[in-house]
Amino acid sequence: MVGLLAAPLLMTCSTQTKTQLQRVQERGELIVVTRNAATTYYESHDSAAGIEFDLMRGFADELGVGLRVIPADTVGEVLRRLEGREADLAAAGVVITEQRLHHFRFSEPYQRVSRQVVYRLGADRPTDFASMHGRMEVAAGSSHAELLSTVALNNSDLTWTETSTVDDEELFAMVYDRMVDYTMALSHEVALMRRFYPELQVAFDVGAPLDLAWGFSRDEDTSLLEAANRYFDRARKDGTLAQLIERYYGHVEQFDYVGTRTFLRHIQDRLPAYHQDFEQAAQENGIDWRLLAAMGYQESHWDPDAISPTGVRGLMMLTRATAQDLGVSRREDPKQSIAGGALYLRRLLNAIPEEVPEPDRTYLALTAYNLGYGHLEDARVLTEKQGGNPNRWSEVKESLPLLHQKKWYNQTRHGYARGKEALSYVENIRSYYDILVWLDEKNQRTTTPLQIAMPTL
């Protein structure tokens, strides 16, 4: 359940003797304030997503209560709402700082990031604050604003503007559009947003690595904080935390500027011809059309005449045998190819064991599309032999490169396979899919979906 609270969480005399944890459990609801952002919480396909959302939902489940989310636009607003007792905790990618420790308590850190200064490709790249010449803008109430106030004590020429009217994504867009020269952001935010704004570049890192944690009010009662720490400890030990970090960031570590620019251009000049075919085939097979389109791009760059050295061909790169089995008579026909690729993916999704959850099910099916279902099963067997979970993509992906190595593929039923290529295949599709989702949702109210401006350098 998502919504805003009209009043702070006031305690009556009868509840003051109970701990905060007991009050949450008695209420039957954990109330969390978070931030609308790609790195925290967002609405997608009529459902909530984001690493913070998954974590807070897991914590609520562990406590045996429901979850209510209060969305805010900035970290400053998040902390103000927490200080006003409108929520039990803040889960919003909050950085632990000395100043914040005077006002809040924090859980054990769950992710470590860096602070980075961002500029636009084509401008002079500064190497430190002293070499910056231009306008910098950061979010008011952010840890970046705190840092700049400290840095300015030793650098009187440093100037910046704090804004409370735009969110972090809009600050990236302002740098991209040359409305400002610089902004400051955390490294995981930069990694995500560079796929959408490929001209954004990291000028330099600032200071030591930073810890992200959940925030709590500075009450003497730390029962809920202690419960959160136990939850993070368990999530760290059983692999849940690592799995979530991989889910949201594992595919964005390698940024390809040229490839991203090319993809964005092809969204404009190639995708419109096949958009309806992707939507129709996806609907008929219960698949997100944007995932199907991302697969098509990875397979052929949306070129219906593409042919590989091994003889697979067409927009979805079907083998002759697979095409015949799927009822595809002409692999070069984009409509037939897309329909066949969608049906094949649906069959693979259905073949994955029922106990495999999403999104792992989709990632494993994509692996099988590229590598063959037998080789996927080999990778899952190797994962289990090494003590891993064969139902988790974050662990199976570590076994895929082993299919190249004689020591390992000799232990498998289907032998040698290009597992490393399959790994890249899936991770590329994940990035293409993220970009298509972002653009589609950004432009869903326009008459021409997926139309974006591509400024020249």
Image (cartoon, grey):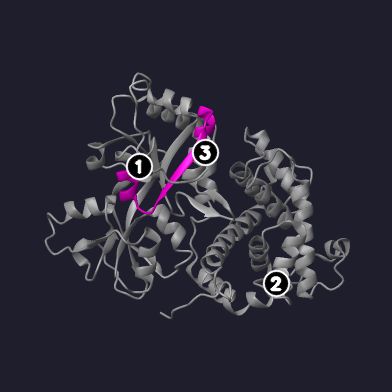
Mark 2 closeness class: few <14, some 14–19, many ≥20 residues within 10 Å = few
The residues tagged by marks 3 and 2 sit, at their Cα atoms, a distance apart of 36 Å
Three-letter amino acid code at the position of disc 1? Asp
**In the visual, does 387 lie left or right of 410?**
left
List the residue tagged with mark 2: 276
Taking the magenta stretch, the answer to whether it contains residue 197 is no
- First in sequence: mark 3 vs mark 2: 3
Task: Identify the element where label 1 is drawn.
Answer: strand
Place of residue 56 in the rendered image (x, y in percent of width and height, measured from the top left): 48, 38
Which mark is drawn over residue 189? none
The answer to whether one can see residue 311 in this image is no
- For the residue pair 428 and 362, the one nearer the viewer reads as 362
List the residue tagged with mark 3: 57
Count the labels in the image: 3
Q: Are marks 1 and 3 in contact (CB under 8 Å)?
A: no
Residue positioned 29% across, 66% down in the render: 182
The residues tagged by marks 2 and 1 sit, at their Cα atoms, a distance apart of 45 Å
Residue positioned 67% across, 39% down in the render: 390
Three-letter amino acid code at the position of disc 3? Arg
Tell me where the magenta segment starts and ends, as one range: 60-81
Task: Identify the element where label 3 is drawn.
Answer: helix
The quadrant holding residue 388 is top right
List the residue tagged with mark 1: 211
Place of residue 385 in the rendered image (x, y in percent of width and height, measured from the top left): 67, 34
Q: Answer above or below: position of 9 versus 166.
A: above
Residue positioned 58% across, 53% down in the render: 46
- First in sequence: mark 1 vs mark 3: 3
The residues tagged by marks 1 and 3 sit, at their Cα atoms, a distance apart of 21 Å
